[in-house]
Image (spheres, rainbow, N blue to C red):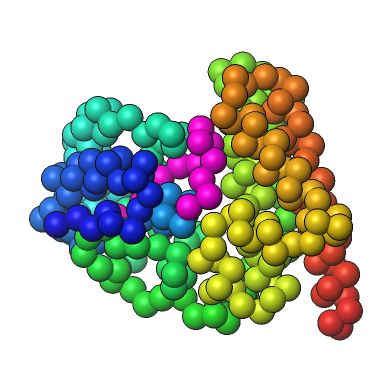
Amino acid sequence: MFDISPLDPLVQPIALEAAKVYYKHTYPWFIGLGIHGSAYKGGYIPGCSDIDLKLFLRDEALTPYGELPLEIGQAIQRDLACIDPTPFSYIQTMVLTPGPRGNRPTDWSLPIPGTYHMLAGNIPTREQTEAETLAKCHETLQRARRGIINVSGDLLHHGSGKLERATRFLCTDVWPTLYSYRSVQTGRPFTIWSLPKDQVISQLPEDDEIGRAIRDFHTHAIHYFTQKHTTEGALTVIASGVAFLQLVEQRYQTMTAQQH
């Protein structure tokens, strides 16, 4: 029932077991289950990247709060607890419904062609157009400073793995910024977003400051998340990520100023 054939061999058993869990507990309302991100495209960073899934259900699956009933969520969690997500950090799944009943996040985007794979069923929505994807890329670049602000504030906290989480959350700002920057540069967002991150990085010249900055960040992130975590290692990742975001913000402002 579940098609895991396009996935990396390390991803296949994890995705399959997770898919079985979600289907087992939601099959009366099941429409489809899709996988996207680096778990599908490749280029994941062990210990940092997660397995991103989208679970599409009929509206009647949800409570008036826009979520699955608590008892179903508890049953799903008990079964998921038996799955080891290694080498990924964790499994992250979002429930989406065709109608307005669900708690769809404000930054939810329609699926981009070439960036996802349906493990089962289908998506009850249209795909994003190239123009819509470019518009989203511009929005991402316009808020690049948010990642800088967030991580700066996070550095004031301590304990319970907060520094590690801050380092990982910075990755969730850096990678979309990279894809958005290159998409705006080329005007070919479908092509760019379908690539693993290392291939997008390779398109940026090594003698360009942004190209150097993203390579530094990528190298430091791999080293940090695949080795024993240290404070200095995290701070090095954060410094290189902030440097990249600052350079992209400056370059984007120059690009938009020239267009006007």
The image quarter in which residue 197 lies: bottom right
Name the one closer to the observer, 162 or 10.
Answer: 10
Q: Is residue 59 above or below residue 160?
A: below
Which quadrant holds the C terminus? bottom right
Residue 228 falls within the magenta-colored stretch: no
Q: Is residue 61 left or right of residue 92?
A: left
- Please identify the residue farthest to the top as the structure is shown: 159
The image quarter in which residue 233 lies: top right
What residue do we see at 88% from left, 69% from top? 254
Q: Position of residue 140 (x, y in %)?
A: 66, 62
Q: Is residue 179 above or below residue 77?
A: below
Q: Position of residue 80 (x, y in %)?
A: 26, 33
Task: Give the residues in magenta.
Answer: 42-59
What residue do we see at 13% from left, 53% from top? 27
Residue 48 falls within the magenta-colored stretch: yes
Name the one closer to the observer, 226 or 143.
Answer: 226
The image quarter in which residue 3 lies: bottom left
Which quadrant holds the N terminus? bottom left
Q: Position of residue 101 (x, y in %)?
A: 31, 61
Q: Is residue 148 left or right of residue 190?
A: right
Q: Position of residue 44 (x, y in %)?
A: 51, 45
Q: Can residue 88 be seen?
A: yes
